[in-house]
């Protein structure tokens, strides 16, 4: 069997075998000769700089120091020149991120109650009692309240029995009308803070718990009055929180109103008294007074709020024009309890809903 394999072996072809091996050997030899020559040149090149570096001349030292100083100078100037160019994109990116975050927050607020109703209508095309029951469930879980939800549902059923709820659009319109009817029920008014006071200055006390947006509401009211040509004085009656005074001063500068403030931890009643006195002396049209963000569960703080009202009425020699209760619209049913307890302590005459 071995003799049969030998003719097929490439070793039996001497012409091909020698021609393949010899060129490889001939090519390898010049490369091997070139490596020692290149290594020798590199070794000489390394030795030459080292020898020169050991004994530098004074001119060489000056030449070496000068480039370093020149190189360092631009390094100090470049950041100063590039800082404004880098700051603008950074500020722009930050503002864009803020806008995106704001839009996302508003979308989540809008998408809660309304989006659930829209999704409900998308599943069921037929307007029937089962759909109305599901609408009631959405209203209750959205913290509308059981009584109010039942009231709306009964009216929707009446409309359906009278063939007034034929399609989705009619259901939406019915919901809007029922909500509007509740908000505009007899005994309720809107826009009361913009009515002319009985006599100048008109005094508006802004009350509410911490974080509902009292200071921002004050700034918006002041801006509206100023746009109508009225002179407004702001009273920093929240003396328990230093940041509250600073925030009101910022709004005062934005709107162009004077801000009356006292020392830290000063008596809020005295600050508001001084603001009303200043308004009467300067013939101002309105005094808008901030108050401490007291919790409605704190009895002693509610008593202090009563003292503020008495002090303001003493300075005016008449009742104040408006006691505006600011409520966070996202609070839900707890807002009713807040309103009731504030109403029991002082004569709340108006409500401002924020964060809608």
Image (cartoon, rainbow, N blue to C red):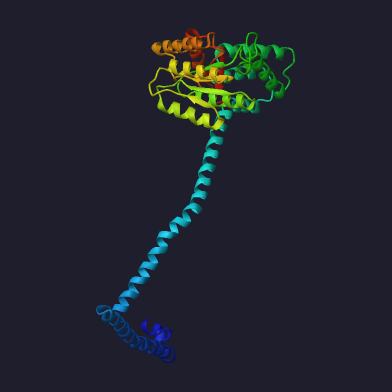
**Total tally of numbered discs in the picture:** 0
Q: Which of the 4 image quarters holds residue 355?
A: top right
Foreground of the two, 156 or 265: 265
Query: Quick one: 167 or 255, which is closer to the camera?
Result: 255
Q: Residue furthest left?
A: 54
Q: Nearer the viewer, residue 348 or 143?
A: 348
Q: Which residue: 61% across, 26% down?
A: 226
Q: Position of residue 157 (x, y in %)?
A: 67, 13
Whether residue 164 is visible here, answered yes or no, is yes
Outermost residue, front side: 281
Q: Residue at x 43, y 56 (%)?
A: 79
Q: Is residue 93 above or below residue 59?
A: above
In the picture, which quadrant includes the C terminus?
top right
- For image coordinates 44% across by 11% down, the residue present is 307
Residue 16, percent across and down?
Answer: 44, 89
Quadrant position of the N terminus in the picture:
bottom left
Q: Quadrant of residue 196?
A: top right
- Most extreme residue toward the bottom is 15
Query: Can residue 206 be seen in this snapshot?
Result: no
Residue 255 in percent (x, y) is at 56, 30
Residue 263 lies in quadrant: top left
Q: Position of residue 245 (x, y in %)?
A: 45, 26
Q: Nearer the viewer, residue 316 or 240?
A: 316
Q: Residue at x 33, y 73 (%)?
A: 64
């Amino acid at each position: 069997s071995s003799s049969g394999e030998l003719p097929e072996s490439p070793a039996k072809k001497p012409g091909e075998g020698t021609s393949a091996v010899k060129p490889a050997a001939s090519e390898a030899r010049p490369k091997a000769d070139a490596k020692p020559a290149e290594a020798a040149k590199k070794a000489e090149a390394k030795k030459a700089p080292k020898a020169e570096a050991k004994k530098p001349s004074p001119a060489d030292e000056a030449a070496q120091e000068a480039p370093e100083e020149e190189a360092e100078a631009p390094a100090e100037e470049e950041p100063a020149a590039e800082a404004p160019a880098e700051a603008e994109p950074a500020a722009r990116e930050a503002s864009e991120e803020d806008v995106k975050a704001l839009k996302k927050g508003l979308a989540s607020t809008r998408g809660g109650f309304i989006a659930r109703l829209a999704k409900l209508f998308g599943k069921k095309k037929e307007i029937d009692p089962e759909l109305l029951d599901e609408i009631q469930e959405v209203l209750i879980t959205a913290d509308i309240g059981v009584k109010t939800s039942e009231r709306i549902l009964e009216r929707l059923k009446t409309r359906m029995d009278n063939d007034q709820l034929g399609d989705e659009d009619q259901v939406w319109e019915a919901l809007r009308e029922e909500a509007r009817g509740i908000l505009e029920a007899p005994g309720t008014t809107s826009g009361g803070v913009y009515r002319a006071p009985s006599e100048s200055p008109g005094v508006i006390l802004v009350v509410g718990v911490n974080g509902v947006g009292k200071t921002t509401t004050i700034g918006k009211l002041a801006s509206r009055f100023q746009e109508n040509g009225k002179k407004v004085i702001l009273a920093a009656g929240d003396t328990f929180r230093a940041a509250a005074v600073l925030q009101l001063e910022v709004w005062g500068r934005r709107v162009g109103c004077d801000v009356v403030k006292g020392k830290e931890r000063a008596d809020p009643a005295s600050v508001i008294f001084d603001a009303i006195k200043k308004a009467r002396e300067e013939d101002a049209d309105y005094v808008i007074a901030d108050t401490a963000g007291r919790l409605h569960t704190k009895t002693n703080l509610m008593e202090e709020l009563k003292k503020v009202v008495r002090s303001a009425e003493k300075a005016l020699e008449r009742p104040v024009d408006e006691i505006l209760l600011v409520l966070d619209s996202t609070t839900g049913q707890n807002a009713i309890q807040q309103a009731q307890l504030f109403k029991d302590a002082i004569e709340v005459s108006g409500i401002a809903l924020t964060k809608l």
